Image (spheres, rainbow, N blue to C red):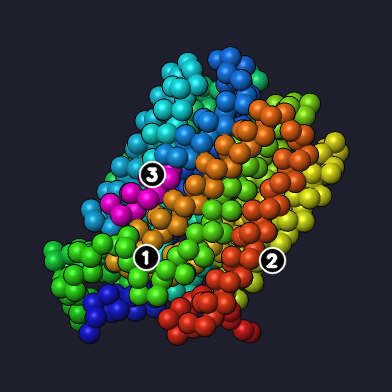
Amino acid sequence: MDARRTLANVIDEAPLRRYHLQIFLICFATAVVDGLDNQMVGFSAQAISADLGIPIAEFGGIFSAGAAGALVGALSLGTVADRIGRKMALSLCTLLFAVLTLATVLARSTNELMLLRFIAGIGLGGAMPIFLTMVSEYAPKRHRALATGVLWCGYPIGGLVGSSLGAILLPVSGWQTIFLLGGGLALFVVILQITLLPESVQFLALREKGANRIRRILTRLSPGTDVDQIDILPSSTGAVTKAPVWGLFTSGRLGLTLLLWVPLFCTFLISNFFVLWSPALLTQAGYSVSLAASMVALNNFAAIPSQAAAGFVIDRKGPFLLVIGSYIGLIAICLVLSTLLHVVPVIAASMIIIGLLQGPGIAGMVYVATRVYPPAMRSTGVGWALGIGRTGQIVGSLVVGGMVAAELPIRFIFAGIAFPALVATVSALVLSLIIRSRAEAYPELQRKHG
């Protein structure tokens, strides 16, 4: 009997226990500090610009540097995690962005900010696919999409905490306080990871010396299971000796991989625009820094329940109907917002609706990414999918920065975000049709009835 199949059955059928909650909460805390540290430069941009004398248009390069680092981290560290272990890789990633976030307060120029945000971005980008993979692997099957959706809520919660603190602290204590708080919280999470987080059993199953550690973990996950009767085999299939990146494009996965990447690219571009660029653009439109930060807080606040609810719906109906509907809604609301930027209640309502729509889009596509690849390349597959998504942040930041430098109307910039939402809609629709045609290979991604 295949060892990983046996492990999968035990995990899928296990009742929820305190140990599941422990694993989830540590990964959730990682998502929160990831979201906080990633977004803080956006709602602090105007304050940093005023303090250091950096033109706001140059923040396109600063935002892109962070996204470029996240791209490097997601593409490389997911593969590293598949080789050295999810736990060690996650702790190293979190430590890296914690230290570099603290060091950001020492920056005095655009180039220094770009360098620090690039290196911090490597840790931020590397952490995300790892904690998503770990929760996906440990969650029982019936709760997996919900766990992934709720986990993803940590990202906007981190942004909500940061933007709320920013609205309060930026006018009185400066932008440095936000970075010190974010870096300090991330260091605390590193301690939790090292002391309380187990290694992935799927990773251990592919290692010759992992059997005893697997049995200890399963005893805590499913105390009623006779672990001595589980056939835990050392890796003899050579799965991890093959090039895992190349595996993303073989065995019929080429089309799936490319079609998965496109919506994530567009989704991250859209998200990056609203959490990083919209505060600066609203400030340029004549609104106060506090009001602009509050708009981002509304966006993040709305994304939290929508992502949790998205996981609940995906567990019962599958991901694609929700995802495609969310993208269509984003097209409409971006066009409406672009015509009514002079009305504060409309901006607030639009930011809330956008948060509600972004949540299902992100949660749904991330869930697809965690299910479409086999365990031996799962961190790699998720890492590359999110890494390509991060290129959307880079491209979006550079394009918007160019628009700002060219002094294009702010309404035009907001309206332009409808285009990537349209591209994401078409790509997700085609991907759903391919997945449906391969129902036996991807049962967890099918539309469910009842």
Q: In the image, what residue type sits under mark 3? A: Val
- Are circles 2 and 1 on residues that touch, CB within 8 Å? no
Is 263 situated above or below 239? above
Q: Residues within 10 Å of mark 1 (few under 14, many from 20)?
A: many
In the structure shown, which secondary structural element does the residue marked by tag 1 occupy?
loop
Label whose residue precedes the other's in the sequence (2 or 1): 1
In the structure shown, which secondary structural element does the residue marked by tag 3 occupy?
helix
| Figure quadrant of residue 106 | top left
Foreground mark, 2 or 3, reads 3
Magenta residue span: 70-80
Is 33 situated above or below 57? below
- Give me the C-alpha separation between circle 2 and circle 1: 27 Å
- Give me the C-alpha separation between circle 1 and circle 3: 17 Å
- Where is mark 1, residue-wise? 248
- Where is mark 2, residue-wise? 325
Judge whether residue 233 is colored magenta.
Answer: no
